[in-house]
Image: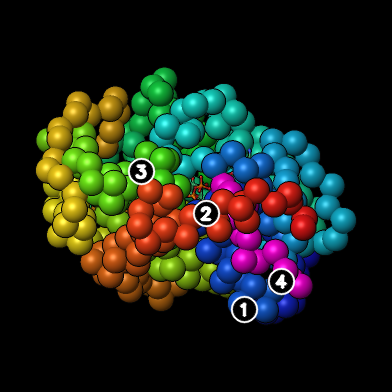
Amino acid sequence: MLQRKDRRKGQTILVAGGAGFVGSHLCDALLSQGHKVICLDNFLTGSLANVAPLRNHPGFTLIEHDVCDWLEMSEPVDQIYNLACAASPPAYQADPVHTMMTCVKGTGNLLTLAEQNGARLLLASTSEVYGDPEVHPQPEDYRGNVNCTGPRACYDEGKRAAEALCFDMLRTGRVDARVARIFNTYGPRMQPKDGRIISNLIVQALSGKSLTIYGTGEQTRSFCFVSDLVAGLIALMQIDPNPEVPVNLGNPGEFSINELAGLVKDEIPECKGLVYRPLPQDDPKRRRPNIDRAQSLLNWSPKVPLHDGLRQTIDWFEQTLPTHPASRAKKEISLANLPAGE
Ligand SMILES: NC(=O)c1ccc[n+]([C@@H]2O[C@H](COP(=O)([O-])OP(=O)(O)OC[C@H]3O[C@@H](n4cnc5c(N)ncnc54)[C@H](O)[C@@H]3O)[C@@H](O)[C@H]2O)c1
């Protein structure tokens, strides 16, 4: 493995999936720290609007590319963040074979690129590797309860295989690979129709509709604001030496879906009541990270309380939902329609 310069500044960093929700915030943060950022995305679930404000930044380059295909880079890179993969269930189940290939082949391609460049690679893995957990909260050494033949397997098992590839490349001394297991994250730039619980509830409420709750609403989730997650990802990329273990990143505050819906309702009075629908197959009942490892290794803890993060997210949806009176969505859409590279 090649040794490279100080990783806190002046690096060339490839962010695969950089036009997505988390990826675009990561690009913002890395540029603001003085790095050069190459954002690579096939725009499956990401959008040009997410990175539109960065397009005139001298340190920012955008490449439209699918990580399943090999990429010849025109300049060396020091770090690679692999966030490329649709994260919401309807999006990753729409083409499950492509999701699996993105996880496995895409991660394989990026690991090879990292090896050729002597670069570090950080994989954005997921709490879904724990499946419907029998251990609560989930520490990293819990091996999970995943259905390998169900409709979520393309994502859950894809990420598990991607993790295995990272640790094989690490153990064999070929790539300085790191794995973050990300728990539910939310914030501005979530796609309004991507089927995630927080965006679903906010969009329904702002549209004056009833809030849809799947199952009894007593199932729990933990919600991490995106700026907290980005800080954790950067800390994990920078830490020396490589911790050689996966690291959970999430907010351990645990809320039932009914509680979350109540908070959204309080913030958006125009919303109607709640409607209950059947729970989708393999939907986990409880999800909460044990973040002891991130706290001790990275000195990282989430800082943004759910109430504050929800307010920021609601403000953003108010400005971008075309149907909302406060919308500036028309401007966003015209930016999003500009061809890449302009
Ligand atoms: N947001 C969360 O709550 C969460 C939770 C766990 C894990 N993660 C992981 O974090 C990463 C980012 O998640 P997100 O919430 O920003 O999702 P997202 O869907 O907004 O972003 C994913 C990005 O990857 C791109 N992409 C998908 N397949 C690709 C491919 N084959 N080649 C190139 N680009 C591709 C998409 O266009 C999109 O821009 C994902 O890998 C996801 O699995 C996110």
Q: Amino acid at mark 4?
A: His
Residue 52: x and y in percent read: 63, 60
Q: Earlier in the sequence, mark 2 or mark 3?
A: 3
Viewer-side label of 3, 4: 4
Res 133 quadrant in image: top left
Q: Is residue 254 above or below residue 305?
A: above
Which residue shows up at 59% across the image and 39% down it?
Answer: 44
- Ligand 1 within 8 Å, label 3 CB: yes
| Quadrant for the N terminus in the image | bottom right
Which residue shows up at 52% across the image and 54% down it?
Answer: 330
Residue 226: x and y in percent read: 42, 62
Residue 307: x and y in percent read: 23, 66
Viewer-side label of 1, 4: 4
Viewer-side label of 2, 1: 2
Residues drawn in magenta: 46-59
Q: CA distance from mark 2 to mark 1?
A: 31 Å
Q: Would you name the residue on which mark 3 appears?
A: 196
Q: Amino acid at mark 2?
A: Lys
Q: Are marks 3 and 1 in contact (CB under 8 Å)?
A: no
Which residue shows up at 41% across the image and 68% down it?
Answer: 228
Q: Earlier in the sequence, mark 3 or mark 4?
A: 4
Query: In the rendered structure, does residue 47 fall within the stretch colored magenta?
Result: yes
Q: Earlier in the sequence, mark 2 or mark 4?
A: 4
Q: Earlier in the sequence, mark 3 or mark 1?
A: 1
Which residue shows up at 84% across the image and 47% down it?
Answer: 72
Q: Label 4: state its secondary structure.
A: loop
Q: Amino acid at mark 3?
A: Arg
Q: CA distance from mark 2 to mark 4?
A: 23 Å
Side of 105 where 269 appears, left or right: left
Q: CA distance from mark 1 to mark 4?
A: 13 Å
Q: Is residue 272 above or below residue 280?
A: below
